[in-house]
Amino acid sequence: MITIIAAIAKNNALGKNNKLIWYLPADLKRFKKVTSNHCVIMGRKTFESLGKPLPNRTNIIITRNPNYTAEGCIVVHSLQEALKAAEIDENPFILGGAEIYKQAIKIADKLDLTFVHHTFDADAFFPKIDKNRWKETKREDFKSDDKNKFDYSFVTFERIA
């Protein structure tokens, strides 16, 4: 099973200037819990925005640069190579960014999304979710609070076609 995990805004915004636009501790805590002990696949820019490998995960970075290296990570040059490197995991997670999501949404089995109920100015966007190919199977809605500035929902979609 290949799972895409992402946090996206109402306007499908993911980030701006290679950074997250919002801060939702509940989402970060859930992300850590869900992805720990799994392979995580991401593009080079996403990895560089994190600054270091995510602990307790096998970090797989996709880059076109044949000379790119990252300590503690597996470096590959295509999504197919990344998935091959992740074969040790029954459920690898794809972390983005926008270009990787655009490729991966065509082959993923599951979308594990946090919808941030707000619109943001952004330069990176999640691909449109085709409701003819994806079925919502789970949803948890939350209101903003002292720590989480925006209303948000954890939503799971599974491929139907």
Image (cartoon, rainbow, N blue to C red):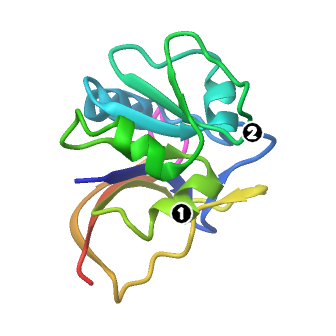
- The residue that label 2 is drawn on is 18
Q: Residue at x 61, y 48 (%)?
A: 97
**Relative to 134, is 8 on the left or the right?**
right
Q: Residue at x 49, y 11 (%)?
A: 72
Which numbered disc flags the more N-terminal residue, 1 or 2? Answer: 2
- The residue that label 1 is drawn on is 103
Q: Residue at x 66, y 35 (%)?
A: 44
Outermost front residue:
66
- Does any portion of residue 106 appear in the rendered image? yes
Q: Residue at x 27, y 84 (%)?
A: 161
Q: Amino acid at mark 2?
A: Asn
Does 62 sit above or below residue 73? below
Does 144 sit above or below residue 52? below
- Does any portion of residue 142 appear in the rendered image? no
The magenta stretch spans residue 85: no
Label annotation for residue 159: none
Which range of residues does the magenta coloring cover? 145-150
**Relative to 37, is 115 on the left or the right?**
right
* Disc 1 to disc 2: CB gap under 8 Å: no
